[in-house]
Image (cartoon, rainbow, N blue to C red):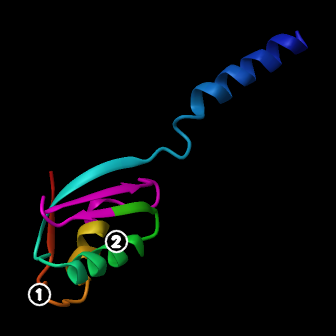
Amino acid sequence: MRYALIASLAFVWLCAAPVLGETINQKFELSGVHCHDGKHAVTLAVDGVEGVEQARVLVAAKELQVTYDPSKTNAQAIIDAVRAAPAVGQSGNYDAVPK
């Protein structure tokens, strides 16, 4: 009986483990970034959002790739961070739209 209970609990834990700490990989169409300084400003702004694990700006592709924890943040918070990033270099008026 005790073994069956332990085995059942282990099964439940193993099945639930992938859900715990789940992250989302999301791409955004990015505008306003035209140089390295703008790329750096947007990356820093998005990295500063609680729950963001990784942010990557691809200037030539006009794309932002973000990995984040949906229990801590969402796409709108990421978009708000992009829009709030300080204009630098040849870049400015940043915006992001989910793909």
Where does the magenta region start and end? 56-76
Where does residue 86 sit, x and y in percent of width and height?
A: 24, 89
Left or right of 98 on screen, residue 73? right
Quadrant of the image occupied by residue 18: top right
Q: Which mark is residue 90?
A: 1
Please say whether residue 57 is one of the residues in the magenta stretch: yes
At 59% from the left and 25% from the top, the residue drawn is 15
Residue at 23% from the left image edge and 69% from the top image edge = 79
Q: Which quadrant of the view contains residue 90?
A: bottom left
**What percent of the width, then of the height, locates residue 51?**
46, 63
Residue type at mark 1 is Gln
Q: Residue at horizontal 46%, vertical 69%?
A: 50
Identify the residue position indicated by label 2 in the image. Answer: 46
Side of 88 where 17 appears, left or right? right
Counting residues from the start of the chain, the first of labels 2 and 1 encountered is: 2
Identify which residue, 67 or 3, lies in the foreground: 67
What residue sits 64% from the left and 27% below the top? 14
Residue 58, percent from left and from top: 21, 62
Tag 2–tag 1 contact (CB < 8 Å) = no
- Number of residue marks: 2
Q: Nearer the viewer, residue 57 or 72?
A: 57
Q: Looking at the picture, how far across and down is residue 92, in whole percent?
A: 13, 85
Q: Decide if residue 89 is on the left or right side of residue 77.
A: left
Single out the mark in the foreground, 2 or 1. Answer: 1
**From what the image shows, is residue 46 above or below residue 51?**
below
Does residue 94 appear left or right of residue 86 in this picture? Answer: left
Q: Is residue 43 above or below residue 98?
A: below
